[in-house]
Amino acid sequence: MFGKALVRDMINRSAENETDRRVFLKAAGVAGLGTVGAGAATVLGAAPANAAGRGPSDGAIFNFALNLEYLEAQFYSYAAYGKGLDGRLLSGKGDRGGVVGGHQVPFKTGAIAAMAREIAQDEIAHVKFLRKALGGAKVAQPNIDLKKSFTAAATAAGLIKPGQSFDPFADEDSFLLGAFIFEDVGVTAYKGAAPLIDNKAFLGAAAGILAVEAYHAGIIRTRAYDKNLFDAVQAISDARDSLDGKRNIDQGIGTATRKFRSNLVPTNKNALVYSRTPGQVLNIVYLTPKSVKKGGFFPKGVNGALNTSS
């Protein structure tokens, strides 16, 4: 059981806005009850404006993450199963959107097909977890483009010529390249968000998701390495680096020269993962170096307070 003061502080730190804060306080029973059960306190009531006004609230950060998890979960769900998320996992605040593109990948390698299914289940579980944690403050899935966006990204990277199309669901090599576009970005996004999170319990949850995303990224990078996709991966990495600012922080998987030199774990000189701000992450998923509110994989933007690229 938690005392009123503790529960009120937790809610104040995680409420999306003043209205959400009042509603959640009332729903949790803090206004009229001496104590509240642990079950009520664990609903993170959702998002932005941390208590000291230093930046986005925990709820805003987790809602931003939820947008990214919708994207990844839809991508892997279509790739592994040929269908998207259950409609019951898409509701919330903001405009609810659909998904354009996506179909089952005709995998030829059993291990890669199994990997795709496992990652799909992880990403779906992340969506469920974040939605439950955010409670009534969770955002809806925005519109997601899994068709034109990949073609635009592949064109920008020089993988295809203008006028051609790129389908990440066409075969397992294309699937690995499509997955590579997301995975490193997710790792750097959670790393960048960690210092902004106030509540230690929420920080622990974010660290847990970051670790899983890092496992996923390592698997994708290793499979791409095994298939000698060095040049294509490097081209995607360079394209991402051209979108997220002046620093050169993105890295490929190595080269086929010098007896296949590998770079399966992209880090700085101290072997630490790089960070990206929410704005930098949106530069990549919006496929633009400009400050905008929509584009690329999210043609109408993301839902929530953190919605503008750098």
Image (spheres, rainbow, N blue to C red):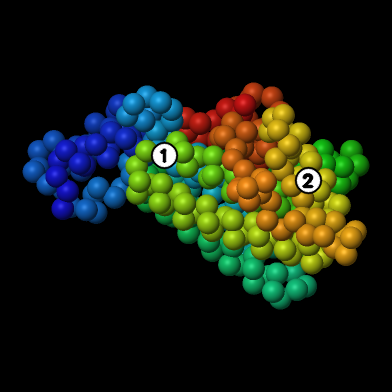
Q: Is residue 276 left or right of residue 1?
A: right
Could one spot residue 6 in this view of the protein? yes
* Marked residue nearer the N-terminal end (2 or 1): 1
x and y, in percent, of residue 95 in the image: 50, 35
Q: How many marks?
A: 2
Q: Is residue 18 left or right of residue 274?
A: left
x and y, in percent, of residue 211 in the image: 53, 56
Q: Secondary structure at mark 1?
A: loop
Q: Is residue 156 left or right of residue 178?
A: right
Real-space Cα distance between discs 2 and 1? Answer: 30 Å
x and y, in percent, of residue 23 in the image: 25, 34
Residue highlighted by disc 2: 236
Q: Secondary structure at mark 2?
A: helix
| Contact check, label 2 and label 1, Cβ < 8 Å | no
Q: Is residue 83 above or below residue 2?
A: below
Q: Is residue 52 left or right of residue 250?
A: left
Q: Nearer the viewer, mark 2 or mark 1?
A: 1
Q: Residue at x 74, y 47 (%)?
A: 251
Q: Residue furthest bottom?
A: 110
Residue highlighted by disc 1: 197
Q: Which mark is residue 31?
A: none
- In this rendered view, identify the residue nearer to me: 274 or 59: 274
The quarter of the displayed image where residue 21 is located = top left
x and y, in percent, of residue 235 in the image: 83, 45
Q: Amino acid at mark 1?
A: Ile
Q: Residue at x 20, y 41 (%)?
A: 6
Q: Residues within 10 Å of mark 2 (few under 14, many from 20)?
A: many
The quarter of the displayed image where residue 50 is located = top left
Could one spot residue 301 in this view of the protein? no
Q: Amino acid at mark 2?
A: Ile
Q: Residue at x 70, y 33 (%)?
A: 247
Q: Residue at x 63, y 47 (%)?
A: 270
